[in-house]
Amino acid sequence: MASNIDPVAIPMIESNPNDLPGMDTSDQNTLTGEAVLSFHNIKYQETVQSGFPFRKKSFMIERLSNMNGIMKPGLNAIMGPQDGSRSLLLDVLAARTDPRGLLGDILINGKPRPANFTCISGYVPQNDVPMFTVTVRDNIEFSAALRLPMTMTRDEKRRRINEVLELLHLDKVSDVKPRSKELRKRTSIAMELVAEHPILFLDDPTTGLDLSTTTDVISVLRRMSMRGRTIIFSIYRPPYSIFRFFDSLTLVASGKVMFHGPAQEALEYFKSAGYNYDSHNNPADFFLDIINGGLSALFDTEEDGRDADKYEELSERQYQVRVNLANTYTQSSLYSEMRTELDRLLGERKAGKSSALEEITCVTPFWHQLRWIIYRSFKNFLGFPRVTRIQAFITVILAVSLGIAFRVLRNDCTEVQTRASLLFLLTIFQCITSVSAGELFVIDRNRFLLEHTSGYYKVSSYFLGKLLAELVPRRLFPSLTFTVIVFSIAGVNTDVKGFFTMIFTVMMLAYSASSLPLCFKAGENAVAVPTLFVTIYFVFMLVFSGQSLYSGNFIPGLSWIQYFSIPHYGFTALMHNEFLGQNFCLENNTTELRRCHNYVICTGEEFLIIQGIDLSSWGFWENHVALACITIILLSFTYVQLLPHQKV
């Protein structure tokens, strides 16, 4: 990505594997070259709106308040109740939140956090986003291909991929699609480990996993931390078998820090503060019990039927307990020692450069990104064989039924009207089936947000790759199948040039119609509203086009609608191609034509004139120009809607 600021690389130390078990992460001398993250007086505010529509009032709420801490190489756990504080702190440190609400300083090795920090650090979200239609190895190869520098050879990348697969015990299931929760979690971690970033963030990596899998995941993270990586993760209620591996523990609740320091000193800290600890109790449960005000709070209130008052009292008690715990911690020796080190780091930061604006940087060029996105997207398209077969079956049955119906109904008296109706139904099929195209970017939204902010690719390469690899085949094959079958069975005769021109017009109509739902759904979370709007648009425009077909003119006063009608341009071009130069009153069927009760249109030109269609070449191509312009405009709006997501 072009930028005035070069991507900042965080160096890692080269460690001897034989010396790893003896690494002492508490020794300050071993931190040279490693990534130490410190945060100083962190506050995070969010704007909340309330009230009736058009009269909403905005006000600020403080989600995080005066948070300080240091995350060194090792396992750094952020623990707390399920009030959102622990995940929010993790996301703030990982630069995965809106920077406009952040106050305070976040430093890396005493220097301002790089502008491209999300691209040079790993992040595993709680909701895993590996693509389950491709294999485990395919997912990891995609990450390696786009996040490792181009200077690495293919063999070096393959060797690193194999090492990560073996480390996470994925080597025997590398050709399996990650459909289970456990396999998706391992794949997500592998996609980050292959990039070998010195800092790795994980949001509740053990959620939904059994104890055995949880232990394996933490063990892998432990081994990575012993190699000099800084692992920062949120976790809710780990068992002691997991807790004992933690190097650093941060307890947060209600946006405040209750404790921050060595994990093995946390128990002694609370015991010295006067809390009684049962030796049979899990330390994590003990800490959360203290933060929540004690389990006895649930039973101490009088059961007089006033549940609302009871829980309001409990909530107030929890808040007071957490305020007291936060105040007690700020007066402890642990906090004083940490503040001394933080002040030293902050002093070095003031002597350095000011932090840069946030940006997304990629280590690979546009065409390399495009190639890999097309490769993965096309494999994803092929990853739904059952759905594809069902769609193909329905398309064939519908096409055969319509083709037979029109072949039976054809006669010399209504040949023109029958062909026009056939073209109109073809237009209806293209418009209605295009509504589902809007799902193209909706179903991939979370994956796109994660991968783009992590520096996998630019928005432009993602946008173009998805269109070429998924939208094109998804609209091409059904449209071709339906058109060829219907016109073959219906017995419509046309020359080779006319047939391929019709196919070209059908595809122009299909892609132009598909660009409308793409435009409305790309930046919209609520899928139902845009789908309803698009459906209403197509129904209205198709009714409008059908009325003009059978009446020969537009509804008085509403003729201007045709300029905004995608079906109108496609239908007009199809009729121009089909009827120009046609003669339906040949000498061999003169007798049959005399039996017709209504006026018979003998030439295609006559029918086109009745429909008000220009007979010149421009009368045909102007419809394609209009469809192309509509497609470009709508796709441009779609692309613009994807751009703001890179800051989320």
Image (cartoon, rainbow, N blue to C red):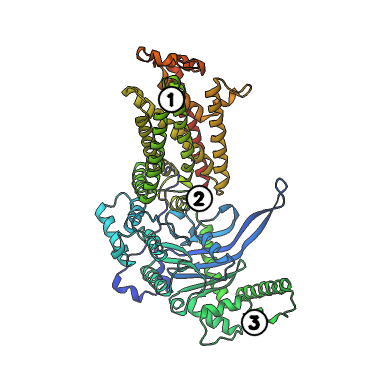
The extreme bottom residue here reads 279
Name the residue: 73% across, 72% down.
309
**Above or below for 538 versus 297:** above
Instruction: Give coordinates of residue 558: x percent, y percent.
Output: 61, 24
Q: Is residue 272 left or right of residue 593?
A: right
Q: Are marks 2 and 1 in contact (CB under 8 Å)?
A: no
The answer, for residue 614, to whether it is visible in the render is no
Dot 3: few (<14), some (14–19), or many (≥20) neighbours within 10 Å?
Answer: few
Labels 1 and 3: the sequence-earlier one: 3
Label 1 secondary element: helix
Labels 2 and 3: the sequence-earlier one: 3
Name the residue: 55% across, 35% down.
539
Q: Say which residue label 1 marks.
A: 419
Labels 2 and 1: the sequence-earlier one: 2
What amino acid is found at the position of numbered circle 1 in the picture?
Arg
Q: Which mark is residue 358?
A: 2
Q: Are marks 2 and 3 in contact (CB under 8 Å)?
A: no
Residue 508 lies in what quarter of the image?
top left
State how many labels appear: 3
Q: Which mark is residue 296?
A: 3
